[in-house]
Amino acid sequence: MERRELVRWLAATAGISCLEGLSANELLAFGEELHLTPTTGQGLRALTPHAQRTVIAAAERIIPATDTPGATDAGVVTFIDKMLADRYTPEERRRFLAGLEELDGRCRSLRGKTFVDCTEADQVAVLAALDDELTAIRRAPGATSPNDHWFAMLKYLTAFGYCTSEPAMRRTLGSWPRPTRYDGCAPVAIGRTPQGRS
Amino acid sequence: MAQRGAEQYDAIVVGSGMTGGWAAKELTELGLRTLVLDAGRPTTREDYREHVPPWEMPFRGLGDRRAVETRQAVQRNSVSFDELSHQFWVDDVDNPYSTPADKAFHWFRARQVGGKSIIWGRQVYRLSDLDFEANARDGIGVDWPIRYKDIAPWYDHVERFIGVSGQPEGLAHLPDGPFLPAMAMNCVEEHVRDRMAARFGRDRVLTIGRAAVLTVRHNGRAACHYCGPCHRGCVTRSYFSSVNATLPAAEATGRLTLLPYSIVRSLVLDESRNRISGVRVVDARTREEREYSARIVFLCASALESARILFNSATPRFPTGLANSSDQVGRNIMDHIKWGGASGRFDDWSDRRTSGERPNGIYVPRFRNVGARHADFIRGYGFQGGGNRAGWQAAVRAPGIGVAFKERLTRLGPWSMSFGGFGEMLPRPENRATLHPTLVDRWGIPTLHIECSWSDNELAMYRDMNVTASELLEAAGAKDIRPDARGPSTPGNTNHEMGSARMGRDPKTSVLNGWNQAWDVPNLFVTDGACMTSSANQNPSLTYMALTARACHYAVELMKRREL
């Protein structure tokens, strides 16, 4: 039996006494997996349905749809889930997921609701405050690894996932398809139209 | 039990990359039935993934960190290692080596047909007599057994075949070749070139990089279409690799036999005749052992791999390694020191941008110790670099959210220009690879212990790069000039390792004669980077290729005269 299946079986049958036989790492993994619903509906692996809704909403506030696609159109949440599941360390993953809980905590203090249940205006206000805090951390003398802050992770993943997505590259950035010649002194506008190439 | 291959060949070439491909082409075209052995798998069109868009990559180009940290912890340090090119580099667990704990060395290795010619930087520069005379002039190492006039026709020969785009500059110490049309500079590069010319005249010249990338159709290969990531392959065969050019030419003769998955364990010496009588091969998939024989053998396995094969071929007559009576095999390892330089910002041309990905940069040929003698170091360095405008990559950490942040991502940053030095490394006998007493690779073949570090001369040169790069940017009116703060590169990281079986004039102090022929064993030629007597500062592949072609013609001449 795969470890993941074992853990799900344990969770499903409340076989908690079996945990004695697991190593420390397996216990850690068990703790992580308990937060996952076996089926998220969209095949997400690191984000629970609630975390998924939180990320979708936050990413869309960070990069909203305008006359060009937004973070939701670009499927940013799928990229973020992939990164959390297959690239980040357990510590990085924990920090990110704890950040989403902090986001809910801030919203509860403000409006008595989770982030996703807040109005868009309240969501923007909370995220803007976090962004200001992050900027202050970045500018503080002797700042150590501000990129490790969970909001820095969320914003970076959103921006990176967006700018490498097909909708953004084709319609927002005009960076796909690639040009087939080189011009070292082209007008800037060349990359701004959907047909343009950069 | 070793099984003897039934076929008999005129020549065996070990390796199918930059130099192995050339040996294959020249030897087959000269009429020899040639067996080319490569340790890795065949390379096919499906390996080429330069047109895959980011959204089709699982990690959008960032790579599978867990797999890479586990299996390619060394290889990932190369600039051309990425999510779509990682398959062109070896698995470090299967292919281990060791270094002293305090002397890191990056040994980048490629095991597939085509070798490192698939992932090379494509920059090609000739050496000149400033380089060939350097060791004799400075009393360093041994004298090159050749001068520029000996290799010049072979540079022509190679450049005409591979196609080199570039701008003739008429510099004696960086000879021009039969160039294809040069690639264009962008607005900032042209500006910096003109301001440098005004300030430094012909002393410090900025030219477009000389690249083995076609700007026009050439020898049946298409011109570059500026898609960008050459190191992921090239379906139009526009940049030179052995897979794209030399191996097909060899194949066309009908005299080529190419065997992938064939790891050369050792060469077999017939002591009575003092000739290589066979090549022992381990099948990479089945571990079955075979032996092949031919009249001549060309080692083109890459500098350190060729030294390793010689070590693993020790005999009672050559107890420290085949063809090693000079004790120079494995010694004098050189690379190029880099990561000295600077970058600066330009606020003009805000309405202009680059369009298309030019797989090439600019080049500033060596200017130190060309005329006046520098007080702190001998030899010199060239700068590579270029100008560009930052895109969204520079904005992902910018402040703001919402429409303003989105707009920021679509806005181009200012122009910047950067210079990065590539400095000559002196040959020193203590920079040395030896056979590890116990460590073996996945196939049980003893591997190398590599000890290599920069000397004071390289470090002084490295410090000077930051100073002079800043001078160039100041002359051009750049703002916010920042010297490169990374510190010197790790030896090996430039992927120009060379020198481990040097050419020379005396069998007592060198491994190869002036024709890349082993002094000790006349039917053995080593024509990869191992042969280099000094490193110069130019990217070395062109010189390896020219020396290979030259050695092939010499070897065939000897065979015709019945001397081999």
Image (tube, coloured by chain):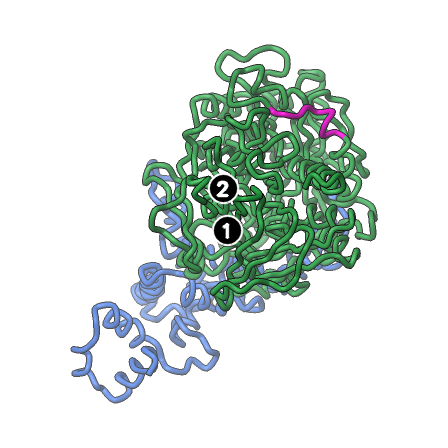
Chain colours: A blue, B green
Which residue shows up at 58% across the image and 36% down it? B518
Query: Could you say where residue B397 lies in the image, as x and y percent from the top left?
Result: 48, 48
Q: Is B103 situated left or right of B210 in this image?
A: left
Which residue shows up at 42% across the image and 39% down it? B320
* Residue A190 shows in the view: yes
Q: Which residues are magenta?
A: B144-152
According to the picture, the residue beneath numbered tag 2 turns out to be: B322
Which residue shows up at 48% across the image and 15% down it? B376
Where does the C terminus of chain B fall, quadrant-wise? top right
Q: Is residue A51 rendered magenta in the image?
A: no
Q: Is A4 situated left or right of A154 in this image?
A: left
Q: How many marks?
A: 2
In depth, the one of B348 and B429 nearer the eye is: B429
Query: Could you say where residue B166 lies in the image, as x and y percent from the top left?
Result: 76, 35
- Which residue type does callout 2 highlight? Leu
Q: Earlier in the sequence, mark 1 or mark 2?
A: 1
According to the picture, the residue beneath numbered tag 1 turns out to be: B266
Q: Is B272 situated left or right of B157 in this image?
A: left
The quadrant in which residue A126 appears is bottom left
Question: Which class describes the residues within 10 Å of circle 2: few (<14), some (14-19), or many (20+)?
Answer: many
Q: Chain of mark 1?
A: B
Question: Are the two marked residues, 1 and 2, in contact with CB atoms closer than 8 angstroms?
Answer: yes
